[in-house]
Amino acid sequence: MKLVLLMTGKTDEVWLRNGVAEYEKRILRYNRFEIITLPDVKNPGNRSSEKVMEKEAEKILLALKADDFVVLLDERGKNYSTVELASFVKNTLMLPKKRLIFIIGGPWGFHQSVRARADHTLSLSRLTFSHQVVRLLFTEQLYRVLTIIAGDPYHHE
């Protein structure tokens, strides 16, 4: 199964882009992996947060396929330890799906239509992070999870 990170809007900060790129290279040593960046919503300042989420949702839903296993990254999702997340990913990779897609929404979160399409919702922390920072945190965690699954010594417990 291919791993996909789907994000709304480009990563603004160079140091975040570099960090995500580093972990992308590392992840590719373990599994097929793709980062899909959807364009930002045009003129978000002229729209309500609900309208921005609706526009983001349209783009997100168009990027998904019927046989994708969709995981939203959301502060209201299920909390895992890293080892528990590794177990979840390992079990999910065995499903008869083509892609395991992790989605990072925009600054307002996810529209209900995207929540309805999700198979699972995951929280990286009870703390709130910017959607930009979550990109780096998540790619590091995904790399860490893959090393655990492979039995490599990156993670110490």
Image: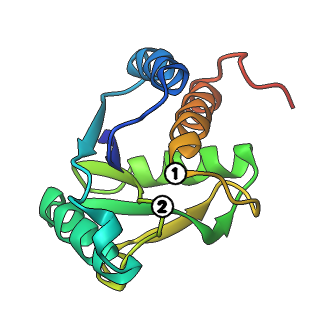
Q: The disc labelled 2 sits on which kind of residue?
A: Pro
Q: Which of marks 2 and 1 is nearer the N terminus?
A: 2
Q: Mark number for residue 107?
A: 2
49 or 61, which is in the foreground? Answer: 49
131 or 23, which is in the foreground? Answer: 131
Quarter placement of the C terminus = top right
124 or 39, which is in the foreground? Answer: 39
Q: Please tell me how many numbered marks the rendered image carries.
A: 2
Label 1: element kind: helix
Q: Mark number for residue 115?
A: none
Q: The disc labelled 1 sits on which kind of residue?
A: His
**Residue at the image position 15 percent from the left and 67 percent from the top:** 66
Image height check: is 54 above or below 74? Answer: below
Q: Give the image location of residue 117, x and y in percent.
A: 30, 76
Q: Name the residue under label 1.
A: 131
Q: Give the image location of residue 45, x and y in percent.
A: 34, 66
150 or 118, which is in the foreground? Answer: 118
Mark 2 neighbour class, 10 Å CA radius: few under 14, some 14 to 19, many 20 or more: some
